[in-house]
Amino acid sequence: MRYALIALLLIPALACAATEDDYNRAWCAAHNGQAEVVLADRTRADCITHTHAIEADYARKFYGAIGQSLWYAFQTSKRAGIVLIVDPADNGRYLYRLNSVIRHNGLPIDVWTVTR
């Protein structure tokens, strides 16, 4: 009985514990893309669609996502994209920062968001 109660308490916590890869694969499948594509230089793009080479990352890691998406775009001759995994509690501050850097520098990066 005790183990059953513990299991019931853990199920909701596990359901909320989606990983970056889980978000990426779900987004990529919904956009008819291929997840985890190994490129010619042996780097791995999170998602490749017909038009985009995409890096998926948690919002707080947006700095690295910029460079990775541009590199994947260069390697594939596709447009760069970032799928930003946002937490509503951060009030969009990382999305704001990401979009500010893209606009200020005229970077050819498209951004989509998914909510944690």
Image (spheres, rainbow, N blue to C red):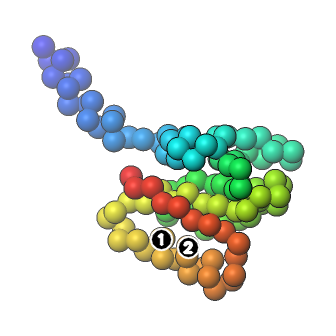
Residue 44, image x, y percentages: 73, 45
* The label number, if any, that marks residue 59 in the structure image: none
Q: Mark 1 and mark 2: span between their CA atoms?
A: 6 Å
Measuring 29% from the left and 37% from the top, which residue is drawn there?
A: 13
Q: Residue at x 39, y 52 (%)?
A: 116
Q: Amino acid at mark 2?
A: Leu
**In this view of the protein, can residue 21 be seen by the observer?**
no
Q: Examine the image and state in which quarter residue 15 appears.
A: top left
Residue in the image at 48% along x and 76% along y: 96
- Who's the residue at 32% across and 64% down the image? 89
Which x, y percent locates residue 30? 53, 44
Relative depth, front residue between 34 and 87: 34
What residue is disc 1 on?
A: 94
Relative side of 82 to 16, left or right: right
According to the image, label 2 marks what residue? Answer: 98
Q: Mark 1 touching mark 2, by CB under 8 A?
A: yes
The reply to whether residue 59 is visible in this rendering is: yes
